[in-house]
């Protein structure tokens, strides 16, 4: 009975003022609980006071463009810094009025105190890629209060102008922006005009607007050759459409063979069947040619 009373008295004293005999380790745990756990990302970078750039937002000057991004800490440093970097670059992309895809692959070289330089490959937009490939992560910082990782990204105005010039050059060299001469001379004279007509409509559908009526020293040549492989008089025709692109110097650039057929259940002439076959071929060829001309 005396032992129980003593334990109760000690417990009462502990509740009121903390038992004098409480181990120092338990006292430390009690104090930590009151102040809250530390941020799991505190060890990522050198501890510094809150930098001014964290709250500066977008900064645009004659010399450069600068902004920040952030990511909530997870305890995985590579993932947290990559997310903060991506957030910053996405904001930079919006400043530059470009569409930045979430599909960004980065290779990152880190140095001194978490500061890094990066190059990004933005798969969905040549414009974004050209402008952002030289952007640089100049500083990172962890906010211990909110447990967020912040990243600052910067790009020089001269780099933007250089990227624009590079993009303009690439766009001018794109296959879809060239001048073309349509060659159908290797077709059977009986349906040469049908092939030429279908070819002209195909190029219009894929966005080719620069077409010259005869060969030119500065024009690419696109050659369409339809060959019959099987003919059932009045019923069906099978064949293949060979499409070839040559540079102005006659160097081969691309070729594709499209199998095709034309069928009639009520009887049709050979030219009519060829017209059906060409219509089928151009439908199949349109997305393939369109994809090639975009490069």
Image (tube, rainbow, N blue to C red):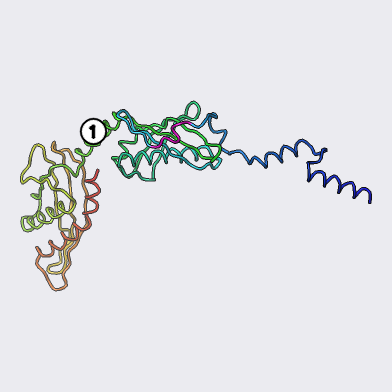
Left or right: 180 as drawn, with respect to 132: left
Q: Which of the pair 100/157 is nearer the observer?
A: 157
Left or right: 259 as drawn, with respect to 130: left
Q: Which residues are magenta?
A: 51-57
Task: Estimate how packed mark 1 is, as few (under 14), some (14 to 19) or many (20 or more) residues with alpha carbons within 10 Å.
Answer: few
Q: Residue at x 32, y 38 (%)?
A: 129
Above or below 273: residue 216: above
Above or below 101: residue 53: above
- The part of the image, by quadrant, that contains residue 32 is top right
Q: Which residue is mark 1?
A: 165
Q: Position of residue 158 (x, y in %)?
A: 28, 28
Q: Position of residue 113 (x, y in %)?
A: 50, 27
- Decide whether residue 86 is among the magenta residues: no
Q: Position of residue 230 (x, y in %)?
A: 17, 61
Left or right: 199 as drawn, with respect to 170: left
- Decide whether residue 54 is among the magenta residues: yes
């Amino acid at each position: 009975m005396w032992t129980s009373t003593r334990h109760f008295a000690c417990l009462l004293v502990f509740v009121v003022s903390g038992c004098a005999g409480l181990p120092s380790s338990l006292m430390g745990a009690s104090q930590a609980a009151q102040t809250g756990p530390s941020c799991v990302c505190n060890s990522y970078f050198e501890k510094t006071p809150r930098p001014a750039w964290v709250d500066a937002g977008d900064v645009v000057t004659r010399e450069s463009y600068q902004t920040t991004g952030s990511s909530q800490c997870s305890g995985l440093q590579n993932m947290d810094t990559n997310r903060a970097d991506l957030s910053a670059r996405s904001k930079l992309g919006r400043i530059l009025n470009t569409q930045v895809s979430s599909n960004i692959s980065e290779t990152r070289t880190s140095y001194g105190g978490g500061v890094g330089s990066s190059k990004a490959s933005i798969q969905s937009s040549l414009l974004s890629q050209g402008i952002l490939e030289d952007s640089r992560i100049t500083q990172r910082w962890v906010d211990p209060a909110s447990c967020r990782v912040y990243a600052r990204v910067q790009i020089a105005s001269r780099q933007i102008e250089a990227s624009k010039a590079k993009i303009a050059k690439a766009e001018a060299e794109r296959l879809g922006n060239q001048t073309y001469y349509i060659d159908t001379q290797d077709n059977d004279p009986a349906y040469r005009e049908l092939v030429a007509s279908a070819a002209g409509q195909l190029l219009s559908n894929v966005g080719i607007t620069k077409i010259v009526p005869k060969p030119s020293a500065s024009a690419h040549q696109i050659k369409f050759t339809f060959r019959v492989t099987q003919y059932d008089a009045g019923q069906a025709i099978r064949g293949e459409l060979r499409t070839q692109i040559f540079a102005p110097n006659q160097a081969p650039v691309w070729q594709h063979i499209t199998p095709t057929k034309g069928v009639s259940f009520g009887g049709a002439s050979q030219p009519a069947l060829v017209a059906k076959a060409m219509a089928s071929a151009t439908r199949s060829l349109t997305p393939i040619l369109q994809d090639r001309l975009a490069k």
